[in-house]
Amino acid sequence: MAATGIPLSEAAKGSFLQISGMSVQGVMRRRLLDLGFVPGNTVEVVRRSPLGDPTAFRISNTMIALRREESSLIYGEPIGGESE
């Protein structure tokens, strides 16, 4: 399945995105889905570490930190007023 949108790793701090898909399979895909990174869910980019990796995301009222290698595989469409 081709994912559309921008990778979560490129989204600005404070932005909100609606997950549109992911380009990962197998165990990693299952783990991300279990954490709530399901197409249609809204995710907020909360903060980045001083060196930019990992990044904290809020999804389903839960804070989850992902490395750049993981967040670059999840795609979303910007939503809301603070997404730019």
Image (cartoon, helix red, strand yellow):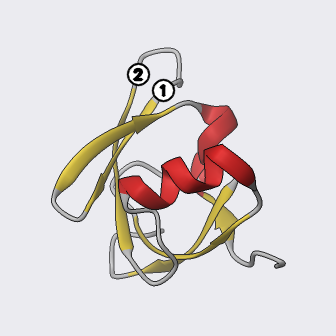
Q: What is the three-letter code of the residue carrying label 1?
A: Pro
Q: Foreground residue, 36 or 77?
A: 36
Q: CA distance from mark 1 to mark 2?
A: 6 Å
Viewer-side residue, 71 vs 80: 71
Q: Is residue 25 above or below residue 54?
A: below
User: Which residue shows up at 82% across the image and 79% down it?
Assistant: 1
What residue sits 34% from the left and 70% below the top? 82
Q: Residues within 10 Å of mark 2 (few under 14, many from 20)?
A: few
Identify the mark nearer the N-term, 1 or 2: 2
Callout 2: SS = loop
Left or right of 37, for residue 82: left
Residue 63 pos. (x, y %): 24, 44
Q: Is residue 79 visible?
A: yes
Which corner quadrant of the image does residue 68 belong to? top right
Q: Residues within 10 Å of mark 1 (few under 14, many from 20)?
A: some
View extreme (right): residue: 2
Give the percent coordinates (x, y) of residue 81.
33, 80
Per the image, the residue denoted by label 2 is 49
Residue drawn at (75%, 55%), measured in percent from left and top? 24
Which residue was labeled with disc 1?
54
Q: Residue at x 48, y 61 (%)?
A: 33
Q: Amino acid at mark 2?
A: Ser
Name the mark nearer the viewer: 1 or 2: 1
Mark 1 vs 2: CB contact within 8 A: yes
Q: Position of residue 77 (x, y in %)?
A: 56, 78
Q: Residue furthest top?
A: 51
Residue 72 in view of the camera: no
